Amino acid sequence: MEHNKTSAAISPTKRVRCIVKLGGAAITCKIKLETIDEENLKEVSSQLRQAFVLDSTSANVLGMDWSKRPGQSEVPSIINDFSDQPVADSESFIVVHGAGSFGHFQSSKSGVHKGGLSRPLVKAGFVATRISVTSLNLEIVRALAREGIPSIGMSPFSCGWSTRQRNMTEADISMVIKAIDTGFVPVMHGDAVLDALQECTILSGDVIIRHLVHFFLRGPPVEPAAVLIREIAVREDGSWSVVKPKLEDTIEFTVAAHDTTGGMVTKITEAAMIAKLVIDVYITKAGTDHSVKALSWNLERWHT
């Protein structure tokens, strides 16, 4: 049973257009420990800028990452451009990303997802996991900021999110609401969190999305018969097709040994639960024309 102390007391003044999930396998090289797929992340960030930053072109992007990057000797000179040109407004949306090759290794080796924070190995693994996932979060925030998206990294642990026997019980979204109302784009991620019964666990980004959807995007309740369950097949070239399976059909998934959040099983299960709220769910390959089409379709629905 989910509980949120702040939902009843605080309501967003800005409407959230959509919640975008960036899969860990899409933005990192999942077989290489803590390695970001720089090309894919840059393409994804550019597509998000085109979809959400109003009147935006690559020529007029005002980057917001003013930190020195590896291999550079100076802070970007783009800072001087802000005195002459207003920052483009962006439509309200939220980004949640997976961990990919960050965090899973540390969590799996130490058993953080199984609990037992009182054990030295688990406590050390909890710290190591959070160092890893927050470092990835920072890099994603920087990539979005370079595209002129006013991104703010938000960790569930630091925001006070917690679970009980791995089921979410506390999710303070007050800062998420304030960030959106102030014109920022919250960027959240799967995280190591405290658990009331087993002391600690891993909170999946897919579970985070479902909770955010309940508050920001939830539609009217419908009868189960009105929900169409579909199988989405994604091919290597990025193309995909939707198949309505027969009732007796089953879909099988495999989970990597180091994946502590349930892999595709969790992703599809959470997506199905969101779809039952009469909310459109698109699953596409990141950085492709299909993801652009999904964002474009969402834009059309948003303005109608």
Image (cartoon, rainbow, N blue to C red):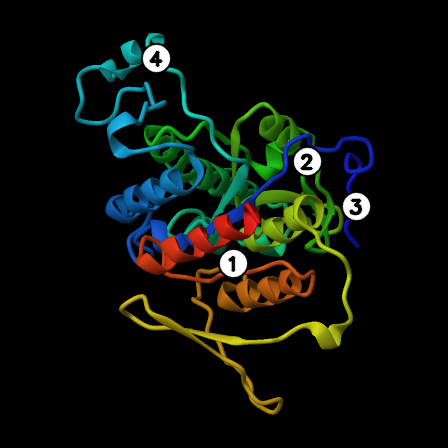
Mark closest to the chain's N terminus, 1 or 2: 2
Residue bearing the label numbered 2: 173
Q: Secondary structure at mark 1?
A: loop
Instruction: Say which mark, if any, is on residue 195.
Output: none
User: Answer yes or no: do the residues labelled 1 and 4 have beta carbons within 8 Å?
Assistant: no
Mark closest to the chain's N terminus, 2 or 3: 3
Camera-near label (1 vs 4) is 4
Instruction: Judge from the rendering whether residue 272 lies leftward or rightward of residue 26; answer left or right.
Output: right
Mark closest to the chain's N terminus, 2 or 4: 4
| Residue shown at the point (77%, 61%) measured from the top left | 221
Residue 181, image x, y percentages: 62, 27
Residue bearing the label numbered 3: 3
Of 130 and 54, nearer the camera is 54
Residue 81, image x, y percentages: 29, 13
Residue 267, image x, y percentages: 54, 63
Residue bearing the label numbered 4: 82
Instruction: Judge from the rendering whether residue 41 lies leftward or rightward of residue 217; answer left or right.
Output: left
Mark closest to the chain's N terminus, 4 or 3: 3
Residue bearing the label numbered 1: 260
Of 271 and 128, nearer the camera is 271
